[in-house]
Image (tube, rainbow, N blue to C red):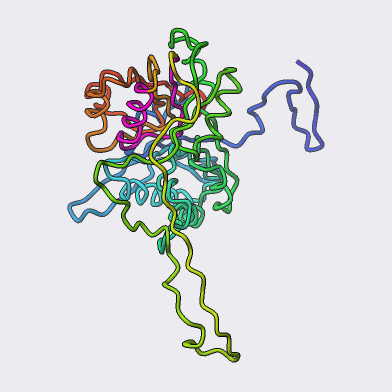
Amino acid sequence: MPLRVTSAGRTRVMGGASNSLRPPMIVFGCSSFPQMSKGVCDILGITEGNLAINHPTNKETDVEINEFVRSKEVFIISSGSCEDINNTIMELLIVIYACKTSSARKIIAVIPYLPYSRQCKMRKRGCITAKLVAKLLCNAGVNHLITMDLHHKEIQAFFDCSVDNLRASPFIIQYILDSIPGYQNGVIIAKSPDATRRASSYAERLQLDIAVIHGEEKNEGEEYSDDGRSSPPPPCSFSQQIFCFDYPGTVPQTVPKVKPPIRVVGDVSGRTAIFVDDMIDEAGTFINAARLLKSNGATNCYVMVTHGILSGQAPEELAACDEIDEVVVCNTTPIGDKTSRCPKLKVIDVSIMI
């Protein structure tokens, strides 16, 4: 392999990777996701850094770094956990700040599932919580973020540091090719119009058709409640307000949104339905959509998602749903005992990409 002497007198290997000029690195794993940090270290052939995280009786989080991190690149692996997500975030922030105050050269946060990523839009009179989480991470000391399949890729703009938004699609597509019989007669399903772009990407790679679930399920006798979709105040006369001019008109009332009954846009009769999405939390949406697809003639239903959050009784609900044949998730979040609670649940290991 050719060599070259640099102006500083050091020898650099040309045409291959060189570790002689790379600053030393160390990998820490938070308590929320020890399986991922162990898997990554095993693949890299390194030892995980010694990090002590204690939770005293006063419920505070105490972090002690038992490694020399000065001038090193520090990778901190964590992920959103549905069991105690707020403490998980606080623990991560403390570990990041501890590395920063210990003079780490660069801090890279590896968060396969970014908590609060669904709260990335302004709804009613709420707030964009995803931006708050991004600011907290950057202010704590993160220089670089590695994550996977953000709920919306525009979330990257919330961060004041560089972001690598990895894709789980190669793993999911390979699973479809290897493990779903007769996928050539399948159709990619977007469970809502918002998921159409992601479903179209999979359909183009697999050369399959796409169908979209549109509308929302409405129980018999149930009326659409006021959910804030008509947010402007009731019309009032301009003459009742204090202005420097007199205008006799009124503010036009905005027509509230009313979603149509749930239906399938596309042909699924006699075909295998393959849901693709970035996450599954509560199972109700997928169960209702699967029942609708089966009533429209679909032969099988598979659910393929990146983040298997599956909070509450979601695993049991999926296991009891006869319309769903299999649920496939990636190990971007702690799985725990969910595979035993739902025999249909299959897990893809993506630690090699992390």
Q: Nearer the viewer, residue 104 or 224?
A: 224
Can residue 166 be seen by looking at this rendering? yes
Q: Is residue 303 left or right of residue 148?
A: left
Q: Nearer the viewer, residue 113 or 258?
A: 258
Does 156 sit above or below residue 184?
below
Does 269 sit above or below residue 225?
above
Q: Position of residue 9 (x, y in %)?
A: 78, 34
Does 77 sit above or below residue 3?
below
Residue 36 image-quadrant placement: top left
Q: Nearer the viewer, residue 291 or 99?
A: 291
276 part of magenta stretch? yes
Can you say which quadrant of the picture contains the N terminus?
Answer: top right
Q: Position of residue 57 (x, y in %)?
A: 17, 52
Extreme residue toward the left, this view:
57
Q: Is residue 169 left or right of residue 93?
A: right
The residue that appears at 49% across and 38% down in the rendered structure is 193
Q: How many marks?
A: 0
Does 264 sit above or below residue 294?
below
Q: Position of residue 345 (x, y in %)?
A: 32, 21
Q: Nearer the viewer, residue 328 or 101?
A: 328
Q: Position of residue 112 (x, y in %)?
A: 45, 36
Can residue 44 be seen by looking at this rendering? no
Q: Is residue 319 left or right of residue 22?
A: left
Residue 221 image-quadrant placement: top left
Q: Which residues are magenta?
A: 271-295
The residue that appears at 48% across and 82% down in the rendered structure is 237
The residue that appears at 58% across and 51% down in the rendered structure is 157
284 part of magenta stretch? yes
